[in-house]
Each structure stands twice: as structure tokens, then as C-alpha cells.
Image: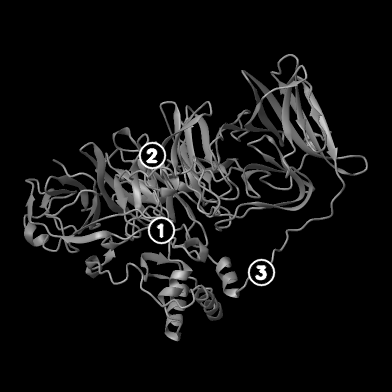
Amino acid sequence: MVKEDEVQRPLEVWAIRSVLDKKPRMLTVALDKEMYIAYDMTRCKIYKVWKGGISMDGTAYTGKKEIQPTSWGANYLSDSSQNFNWTAKLDGKELPIRMQSKGYVFRKNQIYLQHDLLLGIDTIRIEERPEFVRNNAGKPGLERVFVTSNVPANVSVTLKSTLGNLEFVPNGRSRHVDYFDALPAQSLPVVRKEYAHQGQEIIEKSDCLTCHELYEANVGPSFQQVAMRYPKDVKTLAQLSSKIKYGGTGAWGSGVMNAHPTLSADELNTILDYVFTLKPKDAKPRKSTEEGVVNSAASLPVKPGFGASLAGVHPAYELTDLHTSGFKPKVGAMAFLPDGRLLVTTWDAVGGLYVLDGVTGENPTEVKVKRIASGLAEPLGMAVVDGEIYVLQKQELTKLIDHDGDEVIDEYRTICNSWEATADFHEFSFGLVYRDGYFYATLSMAMRLTPEEKQLPDRGRTIRISKDGSFESVNFGLRTPNGIGVGVDDELFVLDNQGQWLPGNKLIHVREGDFNGMGWGWLDESAPMPRMVPPAIWLPEDEIGNSPSEPVLITEGTYKGQMLHGEVTHGGIVRDFLEKVNGKYQGAAFRFSQGFAAGINRMRWGPDGALYVGEVGMAPGGWSWKDQTSGLQKLTYTGKVPFEMLAVRAKPKGFEIEFTEPLSKNVQADFKNLFIQQWWYKPTPSYGGPKMDLTDLKASRMSLSQDGRRLYVEIPGLRKENVIYFRLPIDLKSASGHPLWTSEAWYTLNEIPK
């Protein structure tokens, strides 16, 4: 038997949760450079034992979509035929059982897996400790020590396998060792994929497939759409080469294409040559559905905050860096401990949990960082409940426990891992809110299913999880709901990302049973898909959102009672004003702040009243703001509120716009260039969607309140369930001469007040 003080591991992070080899809910344990072992945590049994390693590929690790971590090397054994099975017998008669993983515990650099064997009203506890050993002849071996407890009288427990049956001592300790023939040295294989065209190889090695697909529109047009839109001539090739190399916007909407400055002229020509091979034979160049549609907003003057993203930090806040050159995390989740220290999880190969001391102090250079957990699978949610830490991994809610008082996590206890999951890269689990004895989280849809596959019923939902591990659905029809939070009136709100069936981004009020429009979530082919419940706020793609994230409620200051949410791809923070009209939430979104290190993924109010901002991105390209991928900062309220719209409220015949400062009395002159539009969105199977019935509106009457802060605007022709877009004159100033911080508001008019 191996001695505990002699144990050495080949990796710093040697117990890793992930999808592995297209199998969900796996735990890889790097026991020794000679032996890795992977467990299927759904079935509580070994998946494989091998010599080699693990390639950590995927969105969180290498910025690549469609792939997940894989094992490499040679197998000692594998359970590809699913021969490993637990059984229990009473007086020799086999009983119906169910296995349930309860996680694992670390003791003295060894791992102890915790299994529950559910046997009617009884629960048998099984602890398993795997270890690498050698026999006297030097053969590599797998030692497994099992300890069973709570085994009823006359019940026997057995693990059947291809190596023989392992029978356990009831309420005692059993040791089992399997030795294998030695394997030669292994090396990471160099896989040379065969391509029909070299352009396809260049595309796959760049970030092109993050936003484009071959035949279906995604964030950007499909390559086939590009080929069908343009003729293949010298002028077009030069134009498209320039767009690929230098990036830009405008050809297919207002979305920004990433630059690719390292691509050579030959590589650009090869890419385009391949793209044009996708054009169907005899197809003629054709216009897109939006080409030729003139939006009068395009003629308005543009500068930061006026038809374009802001360029700096909101004047009412001071921004402080908490990251350093040695610690700049890709933030997956944040939470505060009762003592005021900040917890941060990372969306990377480490899958770490860090505790930061001193973040509320005045000197950020004195912040102390300590990693206390690792190996977590894409942890994008976290909550501290009564001082206890809960983390939402990609496919599990886990409680993290320190048993010996050194702060380093000893036990990773499974609370819930029973929602359905596949190996799809896009099946994220987002956010974590604890209230009234339950955890709330959101599950995103799969994005790369094969034609014969369907979405699993649990996907695209807000779920409610009990501490006993059970869960239930709250709403459905979500796509990529990256973030859930408590907002106005102590209600839950979710942000969802545009895409198929979502013509725009959304701020959604979470209500029992609501269908939120993503058609892939309607699996009953015998019944028509229900009507989408309108969101509280539409966030138009590329204008005010691309990848909205976690919402928070503002509890102090001028904006008290409103909400903020982050933006991963569009960047910055958006402010949301909500009101209830005819029993339904609706309201306006405003640009709020930019100037951060990367796109905003998570936000938390600290005990010092500051807003802590966790940033993330996927490189190269894709889900990132200006290709930045990490950062941790905080915003401290200064009270220096700029001149801007504070709120927009619906009225029976128009709107009331409230400002942070009084306006001059010369309303008619000041607002002669007030720009107003309305449109509605039609969900379709295509990615995103156009503005339907886009109409310019004119104010028929305006009046100012006595204090000069509220402007009433009467607007004929308003339609319910439309987005109303306001663009204030670029030269508007307050009565005291202050210029606007930002000029735009997007109001979702679900209901018109009576």
C-alpha cells in the first residue's frame, strides 16, 4: 500500500471536473504520470484508466467552440461497454438500487470519492480511494480502497466489472488492486486533419467559426450567404480581404467584425477562394433581406453615447483595478463572505476559487489573493449562504467545505447533478441566487446538436434547486440566459442573448410557467408552440447589447431602485429602469458605463457600497469586448451625477422623460431635433431578426414640469408591444449648461397605460 507522505501528482490541478471524450459529468484524476483515471460521476464508476493525459480544449480553455476536453494516450482499461455496475443483494436476491454521487474529499493529497447507494428507504454510504501503485515486479497498478457504512443486515454490495466482481465488507474496509502490463511512453498525438480546401483549414485555426457557420447565419452571416451576395471579382476580393484583415461594421448590420491583422494576403485569398466554393451552382449574387432598407437613424450625428458605445467610466463612479499582473482572472462568479472578503471563481483551465482579502480597503496593492479550490468545471455561479460556499459548475451544484480550518477546500460535496446534460459546449449553467430556502439558476440550450438529436427537456430553463438535491423548472424557452439576479420589487430577473428565435437580447421577469420564445425549447410536436411572453425590456442587437449578463439592483444614490446589467461582447454596463403597467413590467435601457478591462460577466455590491465588476472573454474573438478576456475592478460612487435621462415612463398618450438636472424652459427649441422611432420584433428560426414596421414618430406636444426635471412628450401612433427608441439632440444641455452624458433610451412598450 502506498504511503500518504510519498504521494506525488503529475499536475498541480490533479482532480479536474469537465466533459471528457464527449461524456458529461466526468472527474479526471491524475494519480501519477503513469496513470490517469476518469470517473463517470453520474453512474459512480470508472470510465477509463490510462497512461497519457488530458487536452483541455474548449471555450473556457482555448477559446474554441464545438469541442471539449479529451483524453489521450493508451488505456489500461475502459468501460466503453458499460460493464461496471453496482449491485446489492438481500439474502442472495438482487435488489433495485440507484447510485448517486456525493462528490469527493481530499485528505493528505489523496482523493476519496463519496457514493450513495439508494436502497429503498436505506442509503448505503460508500467511500472509494483510488491510488497508483506498483508491485514487486514493477508493474503499474490501480489500488482502490472502499469503506462502506450503513449497510443493513444480510445485504451485500458488489461492483461488477470486466476485471472481476469486487465484493465489499459490510460496514467495513475493503482493498482491491489490479495490476497491468506496463505501457510505453505516451505523447500528445498530432492530429492532421484532411481538408478538401486549404481555406477551410485556415478558417478553423482562426476565430472565424465563433461567429460564422458554413450554411446557417449565426452572429454573422453564413459563408454561403457571403458567397451568394457578392460576385467573385478582383474588386470584391480586395474589399472582403480588407474587411477580414481590419475588421469593421456595416455590411451585414451594425455588428462589429474582429480584425485579423496576422493573416497574410495569400491566406486571405485562400479563405475567400474556399468561401466562394460554397455558392450553389447557377446561383446569382443576391441582396440580403435588410439590404436597401434605410434607417433614418443612420443619418444622425454619432459620437460616444450618441449612437455609439460610451468611451469612459460613468462620471458618478470612480474605477479601481483590483487585478494585477499576477492575478487577472477570467471571472466566472463572485460572492462576499460574511467577513467582507471577496470570493472569485475563474472560467479557465484551473477552474479556481480564490479568496481576496482587503478589497474594501483604500489601497488595492495591499489586496491578498489565495486560491482555495481548483478543478471546477466552468463555475459560472456562486452564493454564500450562512457562511457556506455553493458553486454552480457546468453540470452540478456543489457545496465547498473546509474541514481543517486552513481555508483550502477539502470537500466538494454534490448537492444536485440531476438535470439533463449532453457534451455540447454551449450547455452552460449560469448564475446562482439563494432565497427562501432554494437556489435559482439558469440552463442554456445546446447549440451544436446533430440532426438526429433534440434539445433535452431541462435545457433553456430557470430552475429552482432545493438543498436536498431535488430541482424543478420555473420557466422555459430561454436560449443563453447568462445571469440571474434579484431586481425591482424583490423579483427575479434574467438576461438572455439574441440568436435563433430571439431577434434581440432580453431582460426577462422570471414567472412560473412562462414560455420565453426560444423555439428549440418547445418539444411537443403534436401541439403548436405557445406565444412568447414579451420581455420586460428588449435590448437591440449591436445597439445596446450582444451578450448581456448578470443583473443587480441599485440600492443607494440617484439611481436607487433601478437595475444594472453587464455586457460581455458589447462591453460595459447598461442601466435598466422598470415600471409596472397593467400588471406587467416594462421599461427603458440606457447606456451607463464603459472603460473596463474586458466585457462584464458578473457584478456584486460589496459591504463598502462599491460595485465589484468581474470581467471575462473568449479569445481569439467571439465572446469578448475588443478581444479582452479578463479583469477584476470596482466602481465607487462619488455622487457626481452627470446630466442624463434618469427614467422614461409610459403615459396614455406618450411618455414622461425624467432628467437628473432641470432643463431650460425653452423646450420647443431645445427638442426640435428629438428623434423617435418604433418597431416590433418577430421571433423566427433564424439568428436575430430585423426591426418590423420600423417607423419614425413625431412629438405632437411637449411640456415641462415645474421643477424642470420632467418632460412630457405626447406621441401619436404608439403601438403596444413595440420598442420605442429615443435619441435626444446631440447639443442638448441642462439649465445649468451641462452637456448630456448619453442621449439614447430604448423603451419596451408592452402595455399602454389606461
> Where residue 700 is drawn, which disc sits there?
none
Residues 268 and 157: in front is 157
Determine the residue positioned at 31% across, 40% down: 554
Determine the residue positioned at 58% across, 57% down: 62
The answer to whether any part of residue 724 appears in the image is yes
Colour convention of the picture: one colour
**Element at badge 3?**
loop
Q: Please determine whether, in this image, residue 681 is positioned above or below residue 460.
A: below
The three-letter code of the residue at mark 1 reads Tyr
Q: How much space separates mark 3 and mark 1, taking CA atoms?
A: 30 Å
Q: How much space separates mark 3 and mark 2, taking CA atoms?
A: 47 Å
The residue at which mark 2 appears reads as 485
Q: Residues within 10 Å of mark 2 (few under 14, many from 20)?
A: many
Q: Nearer the viewer, mark 3 or mark 2?
A: 3
Answer with left or right where residue 416 lies relative to residue 721. right
The residue at which mark 3 appears reads as 194
Instruction: Name the quadrant containing residue 734.
Output: bottom left
The residue at which mark 1 appears reads as 687
Q: How much space separates mark 2 and mark 1, taking CA atoms?
A: 26 Å
The reply to whether dot 2 and dot 1 touch (C-beta < 8 Å) is no
Residue 457: % across, % down: 49, 40
The three-letter code of the residue at mark 3 reads Glu
Residue found at the very far top of the displayed protein: 153
Instruction: Name the quadrant containing residue 557.
Output: top left
